[in-house]
Amino acid sequence: MNYDVSLIITTYNEEKYLPILLDSINNQKTDLKMEIIIIDDSSTDGTLNIISQYEKFIRGVIRLLHNDKKSDVQYMRNTGLKEAMKSYNILWRRHGNIGKFY
């Protein structure tokens, strides 16, 4: 598929904050086609379950990359950038949300 932008999100035990971020992505006022690349760093909470729930209804496509062992955020971001299918990439911290017109 052809995407306008790739959102690259790193996660580790983000059960509490990830829904806020994913809801804000879903509520964007834009026609851009986006892929959402989530690199999970071996979460032990409900983060992966949340991602699988959002895959069913989020606008855009979620691609989950899961590390089998803990790594650092730079490694995770670089992995996401290598996987991104577009030259416009946004690296986003998992804590927080995105404004409607970002």
Image (cartoon, grey):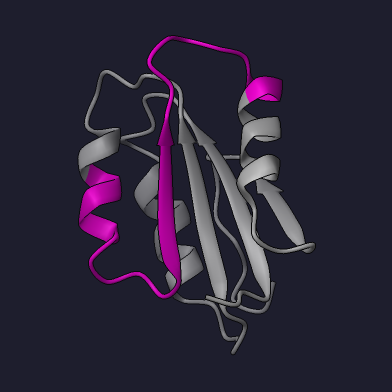
Residue 51 on the magenta span = yes
Location of residue 102 by image quarter: bottom right
Q: Of residues 1 and 54, which is closer to you in this image? A: 1
Q: Is residue 77 left or right of residue 10?
A: right
Residue for point 20% across, 41% down: 49
Residue for point 45% across, 72% down: 60
Residue 55 position in % (x across, y down): 29, 60
Residue 25 position in % (x across, y down): 50, 66
Range shown magenta: 50-75
Residue 78 position in % (x across, y down): 71, 32
Residue for point 43% across, 52% down: 63
Residue 75 position (above or below residue 54): above
Q: Of residues 21 and 52, which is closer to you in this image? A: 52
Q: Determine the residue located farthest toward the front in the rendered image.
A: 1
Q: Of residues 3 and 27, which is closer to you in this image? A: 3
Q: How many marks?
A: 0
Residue 50 position in % (x across, y down): 25, 46
Residue 56 on the magenta span = yes
Q: Determine the residue located farthest toward the bottom in the rendered image.
A: 31
Q: Of residues 59 and 96, which is closer to you in this image? A: 59
